[in-house]
Amino acid sequence: EPEVTQTPSHQVTQMGQEVILRCVPISNHLYFYWYRQILGQKVEFLVSFYNNEISEKSEIFDDQFSVERPDGSNFTLKIRSTKLEDSAMYFCASRLTGELFFGEGSRLTVL
Amino acid sequence: DQQVKQNSPSLSVQEGRISILNCDYTNSMFDYFLWYKKYPAEGPTFLISISSIKDKNEDGRFTVFLNKSAKHLSLHIVPSQPGDSAVYFCGDYLSGGYNKLIFGAGTRLAVHP
C-alpha cells in the first residue's frame, strides 16, 4: 500500500540552526501539507501546497518556515533558525481526493 | 471563528462494548468531516468521513453520525477492541479547495478487557 515517508525520524539541533525535514508523498497525490504536534497538544495545521505554490498557511508558519518541492517526489519543510518552541513532531501529509494521508512524523528536538 | 471541539479528553470502555466519541463544530465550509486515529509516535490514520448529503456513514465497526442542525458529529465503534485504544481526532476543512483541514483536541480512548 502506498504511504507517505518522512526523514529523518528524529533530529536534534541547536537553537538557531537550520533544519530541513523531508517527505516523499504518495506518488499520484497532488496536494501536500505539513502539520505539527507539540507534546501533549493538538495536531496543528502549518501549510498546504499545490501546483508549486503555497495554498494556505497558518499564523504559526512565519518567515522562519518555508516549503519546497525540489523535484517530482520530495516535499520539504525548512526552518531557518530554530527556536526551543519549534520542538515538536512534524507530520507531512498528501491527498488526491478528500482525505489526507499522513507520514509517521519527524521528531524535532531543539536544545 | 471556525472551530472543531472535542470536549471529552478521554474515554474508557470495556472490550466488546460501544465507544462513542463526540465532536462539535461552529461554522463548517463544506460540512465534510473526517475522523482520524493516532497511536503514540505515529502519524494520524484516516478512519472514516461523512459529508452533508448523508447523516450516517458506516464502515465495518465504525459509524459516523452527522447532525447538522446541532452542528454535532459522533463516531461509534462497536464492538470496541483493545487495539482501538488510541487518540481520535475529528477534522473539518475550513477553506475553499480543501486547503486547510483542522483537528479537534482529540479524545483518548482506552479499551480495557
Image (cartoon, rainbow, N blue to C red):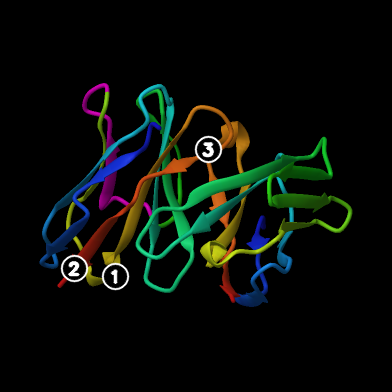
User: Which label number is shown at residue A35?
Assistant: none
Cα separation, mark 3 vs mark 1, equals 25 Å
Q: Amino acid at mark 1?
A: Glu
Left or right: residue B105 compared with residue A45 = right
Secondary structure found at label 1? helix
Q: Which residues are magenta?
A: A61-72
Protein chain holding label 3 = B
Majority secondary structure in the magenta region:
loop
Quarter occupied by the N terminus of chain B: bottom right
Q: Share a chain, discs 2 and 3?
A: no
Protein chain holding label 2 = A
Given contact means CB atoms under 8 Å apart, are the residues at marks 1 and 2 in contact? yes
Cα separation, mark 1 vs mark 2, equals 8 Å
Secondary structure found at label 3? loop
First along the sequence among labels 1 and 2:
1
Q: Is residue B76 above or below residue A70?
A: below
Q: Is residue B77 above or below residue A63?
A: below
Protein chain holding label 1 = A
Left or right: residue A38 compared with residue A101 = left
Left or right: residue A102 compared with residue B70 = left
Q: Amino acid at mark 2?
A: Val
Q: Is residue A111 above or below residue B1?
A: below
Residue position marked by numbered label 1 in the rendering: A85
Q: Residue at x 29, y 50 (%)?
A: A63
Q: Residue at x 29, y 70 (%)?
A: A85
Cα separation, mark 2 vs mark 3, equals 29 Å
Q: Residue at x 72, y 47 (%)?
A: B28
Residue position marked by numbered label 3 in the rendering: B99
Residue position marked by numbered label 2 in the rendering: A110
Q: Is residue B58 above or below residue B18?
A: above
Task: Answer yes or no: is residue B31 visible.
Answer: no
